[in-house]
Image: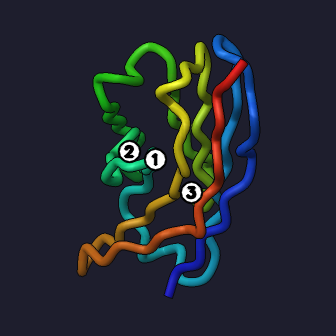
């Protein structure tokens, strides 16, 4: 089992920045890739950014050049640095961890990000 706890959400003005963190615990050695997903009001959950154990990253086109995903050396915490935030970035952001062998997904409880003036 893997547990994920997110932090760092909040209210920010357009153009501002936020940094999300996600700490994994439990069977962390089973984790392969980690990532961030979001679900805006009335929208389906969508992938924002992912990072493999080896540090290979992938971003949604809508956040490229503005968001940066990173992972610490111990590989049990993942971050999402969000710059130049836009109102359309408003969503609940969920941390995801996918196990290497079975491909099972684990999810955090979500953290709200609101971008508004």
In the foreground, 53 or 17: 17
Question: Is disc 2 placed on a helix, strand or loop?
Answer: strand
In the foreground, 110 or 57: 110
Q: Residue furthest front?
A: 42
Q: Position of residue 93 (x, y in %)?
A: 54, 50
Q: Position of residue 40 (x, y in %)?
A: 45, 45
Q: Residue at x 51, y 35 (%)?
A: 69
* Number of marks drawn: 3
Quadrant in the picture for the C terminus = top right
Point out the tag, 1 or 3, that comes first from the N-terminus. Answer: 1
Q: Residue at x 55, y 24 (%)?
A: 87
Q: Residue at x 52, y 44 (%)?
A: 91
Residue 50's disc is 2
Residue 41's disc is 1
Q: Residue at x 34, y 38 (%)?
A: 56
CA–CA distance between discs 1 and 2? 22 Å
Residue 97, above or below 35:
below
Within 10 Å of disc 2 (Cα), the crowding (few <14, some 14-19, many 20+) is: many
Q: Is residue 94 left or right of residue 64?
A: right
In the foreground, 64 or 76: 64
Residue highlighted by disc 3: 75
Callout 1–callout 2 Cβ contact below 8 Å: no
Within 10 Å of disc 1 (Cα), the crowding (few <14, some 14-19, many 20+) is: few
Callout 2–callout 3 Cβ contact below 8 Å: no
Q: Residue furthest bottom?
A: 1
Question: Is disc 1 placed on a helix, strand or loop?
Answer: loop
Q: Position of residue 102 (x, y in %)?
A: 24, 80
Q: Is residue 69 left or right of residue 51?
A: right
Point out the tag, 1 or 2, that comes first from the N-terminus. Answer: 1
Check the image and tell me how it is coloured: rainbow
Residue 9, above or below 75:
above
């Amino acid at each position: 089992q893997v547990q994920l706890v997110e932090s760092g959400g909040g209210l920010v003005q357009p153009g501002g920045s936020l940094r999300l963190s996600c700490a994994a615990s439990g069977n962390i050695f089973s984790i392969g890739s980690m990532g961030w997903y979001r679900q805006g009001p009335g929208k389906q959950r969508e992938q924002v950014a992912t990072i493999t154990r080896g540090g290979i990253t992938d971003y949604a086109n809508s956040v490229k050049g503005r968001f940066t995903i990173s992972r610490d050396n111990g590989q049990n915490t993942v971050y999402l640095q969000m710059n130049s935030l836009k109102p359309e970035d408003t969503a609940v952001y969920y941390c995801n961890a996918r196990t290497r062998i079975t491909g099972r997904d684990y999810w955090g409880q979500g953290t709200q990000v609101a971008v508004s003036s």
